[in-house]
Amino acid sequence: MQFSKPLLCAGLLAGGLLAAPLAAQAEDGIIRHGAGDFPISTAVEVPAGASTIYLSGMGAPVQNTSAAPKSLEAYGDTQTQTLASLKRIEGELNKLHLSMSDVVQMHIYMVADPRTKQLDFAGMMKAYTQYFGTPKQPNLPVRSAFAVAQLANPGWLIEIEVTAVRSLKK
C-alpha cells in the first residue's frame, strides 16, 4: 500500500509522532527536541553549514596510580569512570574551542561491574547529569547507552564517544 506524502504526514501528526515538544531554537541555530524529564533530547536538528566533529571513544584515565594497571581499582566504579571520561571529553572539546554545550550526540558503552554482575546505569546518570541538563549547561544531546561484553581496557566499565557541532556563529 502506498500513501501520498500529505496523507502520510497528516497521519504522523495525528498519531503524535511529529508533535513532540520543541525546545527553543538556540542562538547557534541548533534545535533540540525533548519530551518528559529524562535528560536527553529525542532529536537534534543542526543547521546547514555547521561543522560536525566526531570524537573517538574515551574511557577514564587512571584514578588510582597505586592500583594494578588495567584493573578496576585503577579506574574506579562506573560513576567515577563516567565523570573522568566526560572531563576528558570536555578537555578535548576545549582544545577545539568547543564545549559540552556543543555535543549533539553521545554513545555510551557500558560493561557490567564484575563485583555486582550488573550495569550501574544509576551511577552513570549521576555523573552524566553533572554535565548535561544543568542550569549552567542545559543543552541535551541525543544519547544511546549500550551494554557490551567488554571494552579494550579490562579496567574500564565505560567508554563514551560524542559528536559535537561547531555552528556558523562560533
Image (cartoon, rainbow, N blue to C red):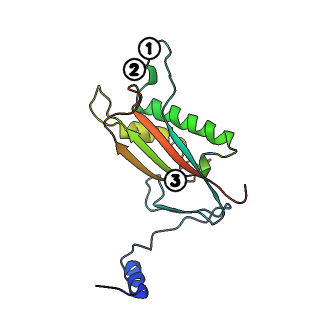
Does 6 sit above or below residue 58? below
Label 3 Cα neighbours within 10 Å, binned few <14 / some 14-19 / many ≥20: many
In the rendered structure, the answer to whether residue 74 lies left or right of residue 101 reads left
Q: How many marks?
A: 3
Q: Secondary structure at mark 2?
A: loop
- In the rendered structure, find residue 141 and report the number of the disc placed on it: 3
Disc 2 marks which amino acid?
Ser
Name which residue type carries label 1. Answer: Ala
- First of labels 3, 2 by sequence position: 2
Q: Secondary structure at mark 1?
A: loop
Q: Position of residue 59 (x, y in %)?
A: 48, 33
Q: Residue at x 32, y 30 (%)?
A: 113
The Cα–Cα distance between marks 3 and 2, rounded to whole angstroms, is 31 Å
User: On the image, numbered disc 2 is attached to which residue?
Assistant: 71
Q: Residue 90, which numbered label?
A: none
Residue positioned 29% across, 25% down in the render: 115
Q: Which mark is residue 67?
A: 1
Quarter of the image where one finds residue 8:
bottom left
Q: CA distance from mark 3 to mark 1?
A: 34 Å
Q: Position of residue 134 (x, y in %)?
A: 56, 47
Question: What amino acid type should be assigned to the residue bearing mark 3?
Answer: Pro
Residue at image position (34%, 35%) is 111
First in residue order: circle 3 vs circle 1 = 1
Viewer-nearest of labels 3 and 2? Answer: 2
In this rendering, is residue 48 above or below 78? below
- Above or below 115: residue 133: below
Front residue of 65/128: it is 65
